[in-house]
Image (tube, rainbow, N blue to C red):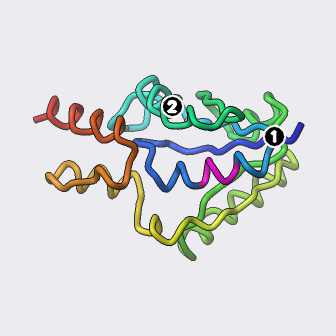
Amino acid sequence: MRRAVCPGSFDPVTNGHLDIIGRAAGLFDEVVVATGVNVSKSRLFDPEERLEMLREAVAPWSNVTVAGFSGLIVDFCRDIGAGAIVKGLRGATDYEYELPMAQMNRHLTGVETVFLPGAVGNAFVSSSLIKEVATLGGDVSALVPAPVAARLAEKLADRA
């Protein structure tokens, strides 16, 4: 079985993430969407909220599951028998950031990284930008799944 991991913070999950996850689901027998559960990092959504949103968002793909992890992603890959990490690239800046990590991951455990170019319509979408725009009152509903947009609005209303 060809198993791959799509790692990320997914704070929150965006339509850009789902584009990459869906395409990975077509390339691999099983895809595990993995989000770090490191509580020391500052996130808008806590680990369990991110896992819940991800489970709902990936429900259309029967070969996609969701898991939390801590530590190195390559250790998680080894633990679950995944031979590949799938990462989406929006442009050259992402590539320059991701390439050294891919090389280190391969050096450490032999896990390969597969880069998928993001859809052109999602090239500007990032979780950070989604949060910033939403915090300032902008409409991000076309850029995230509907349940995520609702949770984002609720979370930001609680902070006000």
Percent x, y of residue 121: 45, 68
Query: Mark 2: which amino acid?
Result: Asn
Percent x, y of residue 133: 23, 56
Q: Whole-Å distance between the Cαs marked 1 and 2?
A: 28 Å
Percent x, y of residue 67: 62, 28
Instruction: Classify residue 91 by image quadrant.
Output: bottom right
* Badge 1: residue crowd in 10 Å (few <14, some 14–19, many ≥20): few
Residue at 71 percent of width and 34 percent of height: 63
Q: Which residue is mark 2?
A: 38
Against 159, is 74 above or below? below
Badge 1 or badge 2: first in the primary sequence: 1
Percent x, y of residue 144: 38, 48
Q: Which residues are magenta?
A: 20-24
| Foreground residue among 114 and 46 | 114
Please say whether residue 23 is one of the residues in the magenta stretch: yes
Against 160, is 121 above or below? below
| Foreground residue among 12 and 28 | 28
Quadrant showing the N terminus: top right
91 sits to left or right of 79:
left
Q: Nearer the viewer, mark 1 or mark 2?
A: 1
Residue at 22 percent of width and 50 percent of height: 134
Residue at 65 percent of width and 30 percent of height: 65
Residue extending furthest left? Answer: 160
Residue at 36 percent of width and 38 percent of height: 148
Rendered image: mark on residue 147: none
Residue extending furthest top? Answer: 48
Quadrant showing the C terminus: top left
